[in-house]
Amino acid sequence: MHSAKTARLMPGSIAEIRSWREISSTLDREGMLDSLPFMPEMRKYCGQRFAVTKRLERTCEEAEGGMRRIRDVVFLDNLRCDGSMHGGCQKGCMLFWREAWLREVVEGTLDQPGPCDDEAGNYPFSCSLPNGQYICQSTELIRATTFLSPLDFGSYARDIQAKTYSVYTLSRVLAYAWYLRLRCLLTGRSYRVVEGTRNSTPVDVLILQPGEWVRVKSKEEIAATLDRNGKNQGLAFTVEMVQFCGKTFRVLKRLEKMIHEPSRKLIQVRNTVVLDGVTCDGCHILRGGCPRENYHFWREAWLERVEKD
């Protein structure tokens, strides 16, 4: 299936998500539009209105770990996947909305219209494969996007035109990404992770619960828990996470299972939490960061409980 010509939605616009009947007419036999699935977790939003918070012209993807070109997609408010139909995946990825699934509300408000009258019926597409793999927007991003050449300097202009970034923000992130690479060249230190020295890494069990408050330990304290690849029990502490060291946050949820994009398998995770509002900005990426706003994952060994007044 291919996208119908739709209005170009920009940040600040109000969009109404079309009815399931309208959306399903855009999908192929696998429930996708231009290789991007409309997932069952998204159906509950049909007929509702949300503010467009971001227009995407590129995105990271985790199957091959690169930055890719994407078209005709926006984010709405902070709508994230709850994983309810994908084995209970707890990653909380932002939902990608094709513009063909939306209509702009001109001179309207966020007041919700009346309920749709055609939302009955089961979601007719499969989210899983017989071998135990799952299909979601994150696993399919490699197919829903196209190669983004390192020489495509027009991507910076597209980011600014789409208001994904301001000139100042884009310049600041680019400068930091170049600094990290220069540092790597001069010192050999990674531009991607904070490296440790341990051969085996410690496990700290705090059994943190949603709503509790924690302080992120200092960079030096965290480095003491990492191996030479910047990982604790296989989970990397990236340079994007350094900015949160020493700060206090509320635990949003425990992370106990998630879909691993390269394998499409649901994997178990231990002693890890997600912190409210703490997302990745991709500051090491020479493209000028990543607009995807993925949650960071925090080992309990990197945190300590605090009392919040």
Image: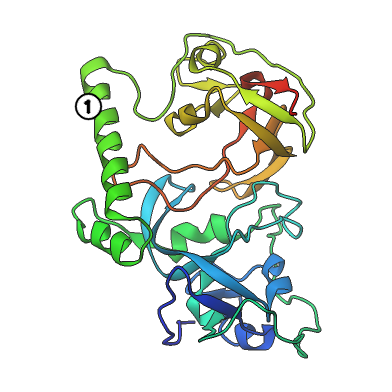
Against 196, residue 9 (above or below) is below
Q: Quadrant of the C terminus?
A: top right
Residue depicted at 80% across the width and 82% down the height: 121
Against 200, residue 5 (above or below) is below
**Is 302 displayed left or right of 230 in the figure?**
right
Residue depicted at 50% across the width and 14% down the height: 223
Q: In the image, what residue type sits under mark 1?
A: Leu
> What colour scheme governs how the chains and residues are painted in the rendered image of this protein?
rainbow
Indicate the quadrant where residue 125 lies. bottom right
How many numbered tags mark residues here? 1
Residue 183: % across, % down? 26, 22
**Is 58 displayed left or right of 27 in the figure?**
left
Residue 306: % across, % down? 72, 22
Kind of element beneath mark 1:
helix
Q: Hey, which residue is sitting farthest front in the picture? A: 309
Q: Hey, which residue is sitting farthest bottom in the picture? A: 117
Against 309, residue 291 (above or below) is below
Disc 1 marks which residue? 182
Indicate the quadrant where residue 174 lies. top left
Residue depicted at 50% across the width and 70% down the height: 35
Q: Residues within 10 Å of mark 1 (few under 14, many from 20)?
A: some
Residue 69: % across, % down? 35, 61
Given residues 1 and 295, the one toward you in this image is 295
Residue 32: % across, % down? 56, 73
**Is 4 displayed left or right of 252 in the figure?**
left
Indicate the quadrant where residue 137 lies. bottom right
Given residues 57 and 173, the one toward you in this image is 173
